[in-house]
Image (spheres, rainbow, N blue to C red):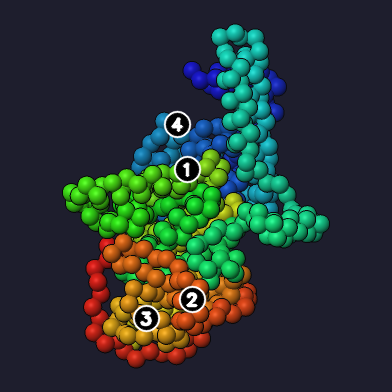
Amino acid sequence: MTEENKSREVATKDNNTALLFNDQIEIRVLTNLMFNNGLFYQAGSLLSGKLFHDTRNARVLEIIRKGIVDGKNVDNIYVATELLRKPDPKCYKGQDILVVFSEYITDVSFGQDLQLLREYAKRRRMWFLGQSLIRTGVDMSVTTEWGMKEIDKFMSEDDDEDEGPISMKQANEMMMQRVDDNLSGKSDTMIPTGFYCLDEHGGLQTDDFDIIAADSSMGKTAFAMTIAVNGAKAGKPVMIYSMEMTAVQLAARINAHSANTPSSIIQYKKLAQQQYRDLQHATEETNVLPIYFDDKSTTSVDAIIASIRRYTRKLHIKLAVIDYIQILSSIGQIKNQEAFLGETSRKFKNLAKELHICVLALSQLARNQQDPRPQLSRLRGPGQTVEAADDVLMIWRPEMYGKTSYKDSNAPVTDTAEIIIGKGRNIGTGSFIVHFEKSYTYFYDATSEERERWDPMVITSANDGASVSKEESDPLPPPVVSKEEEIPF
């Protein structure tokens, strides 16, 4: 029996512990969720199964959560049907649901009830911690280290507590601290990308939700991995969620350029001795980078969000890369993909603000053979997605469409790409040219001499709207013959 279970057993014998839970409030909260599913999203991270003293109620919340996430209209009949279809010994019987959760309750008190449940849950945890510490003090078989771990566990579980509103004075103090950090070079909000035209205007920022968008086989994953590596080199921990590639495949992609060997050869061919030595040297350099992969949490948006929350606390993640959001809409039954993508984008934006991290999501563009240059209007679920995003970076490689020149730059199209900032809430809009090595699926920045010689379009001032760069209004002629090289994106 665990220490918490022992404490729980003692707690049930102590009359004073009646103050530590309230079954009626638990039932009211769940009933409100059944009658008004919108409250589930309003509650957000404040709602958790740990709030419920009665394990049956915690199980009901799980059923409600799954039903709402799956797009169902969840009420007491739905929950009862689920329990009749699949009885759970740890929950109510199906027919009991209609009795226990039958009374309509106004949702006016929902917020207050939820806060009371959080207060009860916190007091229970304090009680359990107190019992554990008492045992540590009187039982020599229990180490003091164990007691300290219990205290640390209690403190870490308190990370998501609501700290209340921020006053104007506090906001000004935080703003000036950011200004001072920028002046001294100690800013912790910027995530360097390794590309001058982005970093000179602030790079990626914590609290932001950013998108990399392009047609298939244009290099979305490669560009995102380049940013992830450069951010990690600057000491910003990165977590990567890929619905298409495993951690091993991404590791091969990340090491390919330094090892001077294509990732496909690294994974599937017998390496020559020099290739093997080069790969070993490359891994020695990347071993120390704070880059992490979570292949097990890519089953749904909620699973990814839960993982980001967990590892932001444990690993201090600053950048979460999600490759890519359209695949998430194919998991489960999504009736309206555009609405789903808009809702998902808002969730990622809210998560970035809440955890003070940058969420970078990859997105496919709808194809347009008549005008292949990337445009915001081609972003899937364009209205809500673009509205939620702080920055939208789009990749344009003219050579993929048989073109021999850029429209606004004299840079060569061979082995280069144009990064179009279609929306830049804080960094402005515009575009710049970078290098792209197809063999290694690797992007890298142009030199200062190249930037001056290629005369790329300058980035305009930032604004709060979904601005687009000027090339969007000028359609291109139809592509010549499209001969797309096979890149394993």
Asked whether the residues under the numbered discs 4 and 1 touch, taking CB atoms below 8 Å apart as contact, a structural biologist would say no
- Counting from the top left corner in percent of width and height, residue 206 is at 59, 57
Q: Circle 2 sits in a helix, a strand or a loop, which is it?
A: helix
Q: Residue at x 31, y 85 (%)?
A: 403
Tell me where residue 288 sits by quadrant: top left
Ranked by sequence position, the earlier of labels 1 and 3 is 1
Q: Is residue 87 left or right of residue 154?
A: left
To which residue does mark 2 refer? Answer: 449
Q: Look at label 4 and name its amino acid.
A: Lys
Residue 62: mark in rendering:
1
Q: Is residue 182 left or right of residue 305?
A: right
Q: Residue at x 35, y 47 (%)?
A: 281
Q: Look at label 1 and name its amino acid.
A: Glu
Asked whether 106 or 306 is in front, the reply is 306
Q: Look at label 3 and name its amino acid.
A: Pro
Q: CA distance from mark 1 to mark 3?
A: 56 Å
Ranked by sequence position, the earlier of labels 2 and 4 is 4
Q: CA distance from mark 1 to mark 2?
A: 58 Å
To which residue does mark 4 refer? Answer: 90
- Counting from the top left corner in percent of width and height, residue 15 is at 68, 20
For the residue carrying disc 3, how many other residues have a C-alpha within 10 Å: few (<14), some (14-19), or many (20+)? Answer: some
Q: CA distance from mark 4 to mark 1?
A: 12 Å
Q: Is residue 404 left or right of residue 461?
A: left
Residue 412: mark in rendering:
3
Image quadrant in which the C terminus is located: bottom left
Q: Residue at x 61, y 30 (%)?
A: 152
Ranked by sequence position, the earlier of labels 3 and 2 is 3
